[in-house]
Amino acid sequence: MKIGVIGAGSISGAHFESYANNEQVEIFAICDLNETRAKQKAEQYGATHTYTGYHELLANKEVEAVSICTWNNTHAEIAIAALQAGKHVLVEKPLCKTVEEALAVEEAVKSSGKTLQVGFVRRYAANTEIVKRFIDNGDLGDIYYAKATCLRRLGNPGGWFADKERSGGGPLIDLGVHIIDICWYLMGKPKVKSIRGNTYHQLGNRSNVEHLDFYKAADYDPNKNTVEDMANALITFENGASLMVDVSFTLHAKQDQMAVNLYGDKGGAELEPSLEIITEKYNTMLNATPQTDHHSFNFQQAFQNEIDYFVDTINGDKETRSPVSDGVEMMKILCGIYESSEKGKEIQF
C-alpha cells in the first residue's frame, strides 16, 4: 500500500515510524511547504516522491492513502481534496476548526466511499482497550460521570500552536480534544445536551520564565500568542451523564497534572496517571491493578496501533474506530465550549 504523508512537522514523525514498522505499507510520497524538510524525510524513510504542494501529491494515482499532519486550519480542505481524489485519509486531531468544516468533510466522506479516520490516538492505547472491555462487559455499570484534567504549568509550544488563526485555539483544541474524546468514547458517545465553558487569557506564553524547559514548535516566537492559557467546562449529556474537564498550556501550578477518571454505578476506572479498576465485592471496595506493560498512555504503542488499524480498515479487515461522525461531534463539543465562554452562558444543543 503506497502512503503519502502531507506535512512533515513534528507529529509526522509518529506517522512515519509507525508506517515504517508496518510490512503492508510503503512510504511513497511526502509533501511539505519546506522542500528541504520533505527531502530529508524522504531520504530517511525511502520515499521516492516529494512535493511542496498537496494537490500535486494527490494527483499521483499511485498514492492510495494519506496522513494529514498539517496546521489545523488546513485539515478540512486537504481531507476533502484527498477524498475527492480517491484517497483514504487519516487526519490528525482535531478534524478541523469549525463545525461547518466538519460537516463538509463528513459529506465528502459519504460521497467518496473512502475511509476517513480521525487521529484520536488515545482510543488505540492499551489502557483504553482494557477499560473499554470492562465497560462493554458491564463490570462498571452505567457510566454517569467522568472527570479529565491535563494541566501544564509551562507548556505553550508557541509557533502555530499559539496562533489562533492556524490552530483554532490553545490547550482546549490541542490537549482537551484528547481527554474529552477518550471520556466521551468510553461513556458510550452520548449525545450532548448542554455545555458551560470558560477560557482564560491571563498569562500568555510566559517566555520570560527561566529554569524550566518545555517543548517549542519549530516556528516558536516568544512575542506571539493569540490562544487561551486555560479552559474548563462542564458537559452534560441527554442520558443524564456529565463530564468535567480542565486543560492548560500555562498555569501557576505546583506541577503538571494528568488525570482521567470514569465513574459508573457498579465500579470506576482510572486511565491516568495510572490504570486502575475500582470495584466492589462482598461489601468491600477494591482497587484492581491490571497487569500490563504500560499503566498509562504509551505514545509509541498507541500510534502504532492506530496506524495498523488504519491500514487494516483500508484493506477491509476492520471498520474504523474513530470515524468522521465522531470528529463532527467532537468539533461540536470543542466549539460549544469556546462559544459558551465567549457568550458567558450555557449553550444548549
Image: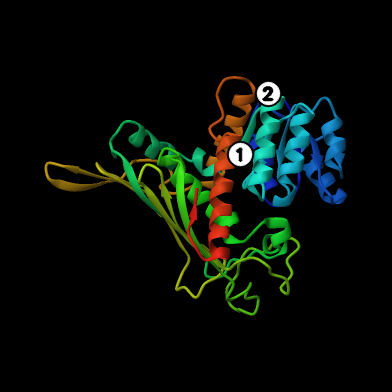
**Residue underneath mark 2:** 113
Q: Earlier in the sequence, mark 1 or mark 2?
A: 2
**Residue underneath mark 1:** 118
Q: Are marks 1 and 2 in contact (CB under 8 Å)?
A: no
Q: Position of residue 49 (x, y in %)?
A: 85, 35
Of discs 1 and 2, which sits in the foreground?
Answer: 2
Question: Which residue is painted at 74% across and 31% down in the image?
Answer: 83
User: Where on the picture, by quarter, is residue 171?
Assistant: bottom right
| Label 1 – label 2 distance at C-alpha | 16 Å
Q: Quadrant of the N terminus?
A: top right
Q: Does dot 2 land on a helix, a strand or a loop?
A: loop
- Is 150 on the left or on the right of 60, as rendered? left
User: Where on the picture, by quarter, is residue 228?
Assistant: bottom right
Instruction: Check the image and tell me how it is coloured.
Output: rainbow
Disc 2 marks which amino acid? Gly
- Is 279 on the left or on the right of 51, as rendered? left
Q: Looking at the picture, does residue 56 appear above or below residue 254?
A: above
Question: Which residue is painted at 53% across and 57% down in the image?
Answer: 337
Q: Does dot 1 land on a helix, a strand or a loop?
A: strand
Q: Position of residue 254 (x, y in %)?
A: 45, 73
Disc 1 marks which amino acid? Val
Answer yes or no: is residue 307 visible: yes
User: Where on the picture, by quarter, is residue 309?
Assistant: top right
The foreground one among 1 and 74 is: 74
Q: Looking at the picture, does residue 323 appear above or below residue 222?
A: above
The crowding category of the residue bearing disc 1, from other C-alpha atoms within 10 Å (few below 14, some 14 to 19, many at least 20), is many
The crowding category of the residue bearing disc 2, from other C-alpha atoms within 10 Å (few below 14, some 14 to 19, many at least 20), is few
